[in-house]
Image (cartoon, helix red, strand yellow):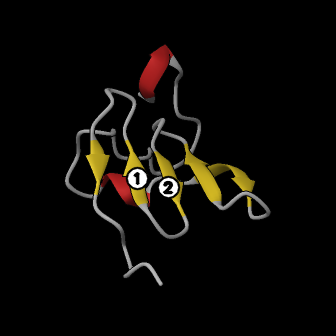
Amino acid sequence: MCEAGLVCIHQPECPSAAAPDSQTARVVLQCPEIGYSRLCNGIVLFDDTGYLKPDGECGPPRRPLP
């Protein structure tokens, strides 16, 4: 089940936002001009500054900032 009560339609089902492999969920919205993607489980991945989970938890940058 995705965050916000939405049912994941992907097979196999995407991992929840709390799962260790949460960032492997499928991309459902991509905005390359702004630099982020939203995953099926509600996580927002930023191209250069980590991620934001639906509960407000932030993750570290995935690569060093310039």
Residue 35 vs residue 5: left or right?
right
Mark 1 residue type: Tyr
Q: Find disc 2 in the rendering and name its residue.
A: 45
Q: Find disc 1 in the rendering and name its residue.
A: 51
Above or below residue 64? Residue 31 is above
Residue 19, position as x, y percentages in the image: 23, 46
Residue 23 vs residue 5: left or right?
left
- Gap between marks 2 and 1 measured at Cα: 4 Å
Label 2 close to label 1 by CB (< 8 Å): yes
* Viewer-closest of 64 and 46: 64
Mark identifier at residue 64: none
Is disc 1 placed on a helix, strand or loop?
Answer: strand
Q: Residue at x 50, y 55 (%)?
A: 45
Q: Residue at x 35, y 46 (%)?
A: 15
Is disc 2 placed on a helix, strand or loop?
Answer: strand
Q: Quadrant of the N terminus?
A: top left
Q: Residue at x 43, y 46 (%)?
A: 14
Asked which quadrant contains residue 9, the reply is top right
* Viewer-closest of 44 and 22: 44
Above or below residue 6? Residue 38 is below
Residue 37, position as x, y percentages in the image: 61, 54
Residue 59 vs residue 40: left or right?
left
Above or below residue 25? Residue 52 is above
Q: Residues within 10 Å of mark 1 (few under 14, many from 20)?
A: many
Residue 7, position as x, y percentages in the image: 52, 24
Residue 52 vs residue 37: left or right?
left
Q: Residue at x 55, y 54 (%)?
A: 26
* Viewer-closest of 34 and 27: 34
Mark 2 residue type: Leu
Q: Nearer the N terminus, badge 2 or badge 1?
A: 2
Tally of marks:
2
Q: Residues within 10 Å of mark 2 (few under 14, many from 20)?
A: many
